[in-house]
Each structure stands twice: as structure tokens, then as C-alpha cells.
Image (cartoon, rainbow, N blue to C red):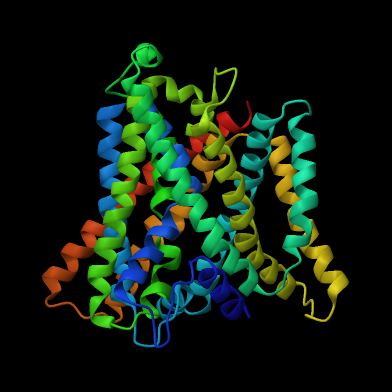
Amino acid sequence: MLTTQSTESIETLKVEFESAGGQSNFYAVANIVLTGVGVGMLSLPGAVSRAGYAFGFALLIYSGIVGTLYTQLLRACMKPNTRNYEHIGRDAFGRWGVVAVAFGVNGGLLGSCCLLVVLLGENSLKLYDGIRLECWVLIWVIVLLPISWLRNMKHVGYISGTVGTASVIILMVTIIYAGFVRAADDDAGIDSVYEPYPKSALGLGISFGSMTLAYTVTCASTTVLHDMKDASAHRRVIYWGVGLLGLVYFLVSLSGYIGWGASLSKFHNIIDAITEGTPTYGPEAYLCISSILVLCLTHYAVLLNPVSRIVEEAFRIDEHQLFKSYLARSTLVAFTAITAIFVPNFEGLVGLLGSVCYSLIHNFYPSIFYIRLVLLGEPRECSRWMMMMKIAGLGLLMIISFIGSVCGVYEAIPILVK
């Protein structure tokens, strides 16, 4: 039951750049990059600021390296008929593996929808502050409700793959431009202070969660690789995809930190920093706000749809029972809106999501599934010594991830309840 529905939750995450007979290496790399680039990158400059530039950029590079490793581990777990992440979970632990992946993925998707509603409300308030944040959230609920009722992902996927992708690119370029321009402006950058270290070790926790969320391409990488024409290029595609993603994140983080320095820690995200303290917005501020609104609207439709199908399956709602389907989907929209109203904290939600759901998907499941399959004899290792070394190394990484996740949750909760 969960397998069919959860499969769609994975496959709807990727931008459709496929051609007949499978996608090329270039489009596979693009899919991996676009799977990662999104609202997660808005928190990266602030994450570097919280950790201090020495620890922050080191953690960013570390997250990219282990992100590549985890994606390669999932690739090594694939069989010729493996279509998605859930199939690997099933090969490793049967039905419970499918349930575990479905929980992590769909929990992350629903939490991300809450993030998107927060961003819609906050950035609409920047354009017009004559009404309260709660009113903006309710206005967006009216817009999101009919979108959530769409049962066919083709139309939603087309909009996300065109308008949504364009908004991501515009947002990314604008953030990089705004940061470097502010750094070059002597008057604007006079208040920038650069700290090499965090104020406390726990300060690394929420930075860890933010970077985990940003680098989580493992939720869709298996599907992307399955749809490629050339299976022999899987390894190279992962290196190129995660490498380019790391380059984008480095430029966004560098430009933001150079432009605002340690003061970024007082903002929820980089857009707040770009638009803060200016009586009238410049072109870059309007570009950031408009592109994030479009991005949130398109991504919300894509991310909520697979979660809606899981709920419908759980309550045995048939596709012809439209009223029950609309009611279930409207309830999910209401949940995301209520969360956005009562917990309107982007930074805290990112830290919590990255430390729990996305940490499970990205930092734990790939290692656990790989170790399990190695012990079962697939994939085969050259020697017992090599197998034990790999298991020990992955165990150490999971311990580090566990510590980072605990610190992230510990730091995110007080931010959420402020």
C-alpha cells in the first residue's frame, strides 16, 4: 500500500527534463542540482554566521563531502530494477524499510509545506504591511486550496519545471549579487562584523540542520539515476551534481556572509537581510520577494500532492470520492496554515526539519541500508577487512550526525517558541 503512493512522493520531487528512452547525463545533473536548490539555501548564509566563518564554511564543505558519499551509497545499493528510495528500503528491511523511508520523506514534505506558507506570508507582508501576517496567510490559503485539489501532477509539474525553475535561478543570482554589492559599498558594509567561531558549541546544531536540509538530494537521486540513458555514468553524474550544488551554496553563503557578516544571525533568512532597514526597496529586493513567492507557490503544489495521496490511501478515499478527497487535502492545507500562524519562524523550522526528517533521509538511512545490504551480500565487498573498515567509518559518521541532530533540535525548539 505504502510502496505505490510513496513512490510518487519521490518522483514528483524532480524537475522533468526527460527525453524518449531516458534522460541524458546533462539533464540528470540538472535534476540533482534543482532537487537541492530551493528554499533551503535561504538559511545557509545565516547558518554560516551562527557557526562563525571558520566553522561555518568548514561545516558547509563537510556537508557537501558526506552528502556526496551518502548519495553514492544509495547508488551502490541500487539494482537494475530499483526505481526509487523506497525500493532500497524494501530490499534492506522489507516493509519496515518502506515505512521508514515514507515517514522521513513525507514528514519532510509536509514540514517543507509549512515553511513555504511561512515564506509566503512573511514576504507578502514586505510588499504590503497594511494587514497582519495572519491575514496574508489566510489569503494564501484561499489561493492554495484549489491548487491542492489538483489530482494530476502533470500540470503542476510543468509549471514547477518552468516557472518554478526560473524563479529559483533568479532568486539565486539576485542573492549572490546583493551580497557582493553590499560588501563593495563602504557605507552599507560598515556594520559588518566577521566572527570565526560560534558563541557556543550548540550554535553548530542549527547550522548542521540547515545544511543537511540544503544538501538532501538523496530523496530523489535514485529516481533520477534510474531514468538515465547511460547507467555507467551514475557515479560521475552524482559527483557533478553535488559538486555544482556545493559551488552554488558556497557562492550564496560567501556573498551573504561578506555582505552582512555576523549580523545575519538576527535575521530568519537572507531575504530578511536584503530587505531590512530600507525605506524603499531596490530592484534586487523586489526580485527576491517576487521570485520567492512564485517559488513557494509552485513548490507547495508539488510537495503537498504526494502527502495528500498518502492520507487518501490511509483513509481509503477512492479517487471518485471527490468531496472526501477535497476535505482531506483542505485539512492538510489548514494544518500548514495553522503551523505558519502559530510558529512563524523560518529559521527554527528549517533547523528542526533538517535535524529530524531530512537527517533521517540523508544522514542515517543511506548508511544503515548500505550496511544491511552488505551484510546480506549485496553489494559485495572485496574483502572482509574492507567491509569492516567501511562499516566502522559509516558508524562514526552516524554518531557525528546524531550529535549534530540532537544539538540542532535542542537549539531549534527555543527559537520556535520565542
Q: Quadrant of residue 327?
A: bottom right
- Of 282 and 65, nearer the camera is 282
Tell me where residue 129 appears, x and y as whole percent.
Answer: 72, 26
Task: Examine the rendered structure and indicate whether residue 404 appears above or below residue 297.
Answer: above
Tell me where residue 360 appears, x and y as whole percent.
Answer: 45, 57
Q: Is residue 120 left or right of residue 205?
A: right
- Of 366 and 238, nearer the camera is 238
Tell me where residue 354 appears, x and y as whole percent.
Answer: 47, 47
| Whether residue 197 can be seen here | yes
- Residue at point 52% right, 27% down? 282
| Whether residue 209 can be seen here | no
- Residue at point 54% right, 57% down? 164
Q: Quadrant of residue 196?
A: top left
Looking at this rendering, what residue extends furthest in the right direction?
Answer: 323
- Residue at point 31% right, 55% down? 67
- Of 158 and 386, nearer the camera is 158
Q: Quadrant of residue 145?
A: bottom right
Count up the numbered dots. Answer: 0
Tell me where residue 231 appears, x and y as whole percent.
Answer: 28, 82
Task: Examine the rendered structure and indicate whether residue 160 appears above or below residue 191.
Answer: below
Task: Examine the rendered structure and indicate whether residue 172 appears above or below residue 5.
Answer: above
In the rendered image, the quadrant that contains the C terminus is top right
In the rendered image, the quadrant that contains the N terminus is bottom right
- Of 326 and 400, nearer the camera is 326
